[in-house]
Image: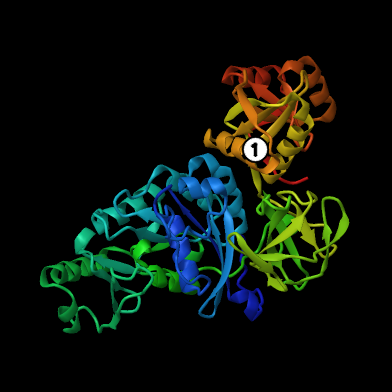
Amino acid sequence: MLDTAQNRPALPPEIARRRTFAIISHPDAGKTTLTEKFLLFGGAIQMAGQVRAKGEARRTRSDFMQMEKDRGISVSASAMSFDYKTFRFNLVDTPGHSDFSEDTYRTLTAVDAAVMVIDGAKGVESQTRKLFEVCRLRDLPILTFCNKMDRESRDTFDIIDEIQENLAIDVTPASWPIGTGSDFIGCYDLLRDRLELIDRKDRNKVADSIEINGMDDPLLERHVPAQLLEKLREEVEMARELLPTLDRQAVLEGHMTPIWFGSAINSFGVKELMDGIGTYGPEPQIQSAEPRQIAPEETKVSGFVFKVQANMDPKHRDRVAFVRLASGHFTRGMKLTHVRTKKPMTVSAPVLFLASDRELADEGWAGDIIGIPNHGQLRIGDTLTEGEVLKVTGIPSFAPELLQGVRAGDPLKAKHLEKALMQFAEEGAAKVFKPMIGSGFIVGVVGALQFEVLGSRIELEYGLPVRFEPSQFTSARWIKGDKQAIEKFANINKQHIAYDNDGDPVYLTRLQWDIDRVERDHPEITLTATKEMMV
């Protein structure tokens, strides 16, 4: 995180009990199932849903878009707030699919820690590695959950070695699995010397927890079959000698990750992980901003928009801005200054989320995520304060990797299409470019699946069938430099120039050669693949 000075005042109790974190993983590692169990144990739902529900089995709460329900994948980050023991958890579920990585990257700017879910059989996968790198750039503390231990999985030491080697982070076991696959009977909790046994009959129930006095306690023999017990004793002894012991400071600095083992679908290991987030996870942290950093204990309220979701409720053309509160104690009806437009804004109907369910939020503290319904005033990267001109920094926008032209099925509806595209651009769901020459729009995305999502959403939410067409361009770069130099360059290269939804000039390219040529022939300007989402 940022420079957390040792002499900072203690946080007010309400802020100190907040834990704001994201769950990251490769698709199918069990992230959405784990989210459901968090809600279940937090008392937020009565019965956990299933990602691919059959018949009457409930759908998951955190996947609320129609496409997510149909495909069993998460394509949009959703936020949930609930209490667990003395803590207030603000959990952000992110899309695991790499085609939606930009939404995930931005979400990671709004949290103080990440829970990394890995599959016991597959270990560290490509998307996990990418997301981990983003956490590393921000020095986010990471807690790891190794899921699916009730299926055939790899050797425990192999899994730990792979995390250490691939991600260059110290790993310390918080629990140790007993058996794998059909022989998996539970875990030994190394932090509290307890034996946790799995109950396969009721997936929404936590099984027995037996207090043990060390590895030689005769109670172990009563509950663990002899051959598994021998292996457990041997492995735990090796683990204690070879692996580092848990150091909360090292975890908070992002150098060490504790790992819990379990099976989210069987509700096993989840409670221990939640206790771990409460005990070892960070309190709300200092936020980087211009011209100064924002500390959570400041009395004045400030917050920033890290996500905009349009039409969460298809019956109302609504747009909700997800705001991470960076400081202070927010109350409903407060007047906040929208820094970009310098206009005051009365927040009269802020909402707290439980995925697609929401309730009016009467108050919020630093670390909380609240939703502010608005009609397009709030955009990603906007900062709200009690009057001071502060701009939160570090919220990225990435150059798209795929470009396509888009047309409305009905040519008379071109104006409607423009409105829909601008809305999705402000939401961050796609980049929309208006070429300098010719009519129509070019849409840019990070992954091909986004075109499908976009097409189906424009049709569902606007009743507007659209078709995507191949574009001669393959990539886009923002143009930086002196205003006159940019204008001169744009006039020479009109056929390559477009403007994004903020009105910033963009250079559309066909080949890497185009970019190299511009850099060689026009040293007065620079082409960049990322843009800070600040206006």
| The N terminus - image quarter | bottom right
Q: Is residue 104 above or below residue 56?
A: above
301 or 414, nearer to the observer: 414
> Residue 239: x percent and y percent?
26, 65
Asked whether residue 65 is in view, the answer is yes
Residue 89 percent location from the top left of the image:
55, 70
Question: Is 402 positioned to the left or the right of 208 in the image?
Answer: right
Residue 533, picture quadrant: top right
Q: How many marks?
A: 1
Q: Residue 517: horizontal and vertical position, in percent?
A: 64, 17
Amino acid type, residue under disc 1 in the picture: Glu
Q: Quadrant of residue 13?
A: bottom right
Identify the image quadrant of the C terminus: top right
49 left or right of 211? right
Dot 1, how many residues are within 10 Å of its Cα: few (below 14), some (14-19), or many (20+)?
A: some
Residue at image x 72%, y 61%? Answer: 303
Q: Which residue is mark 1?
A: 459
Q: Nearer the viewer, residue 66 or 89?
A: 66
Tell which of 125 and 532 is nearer to you.
Answer: 125
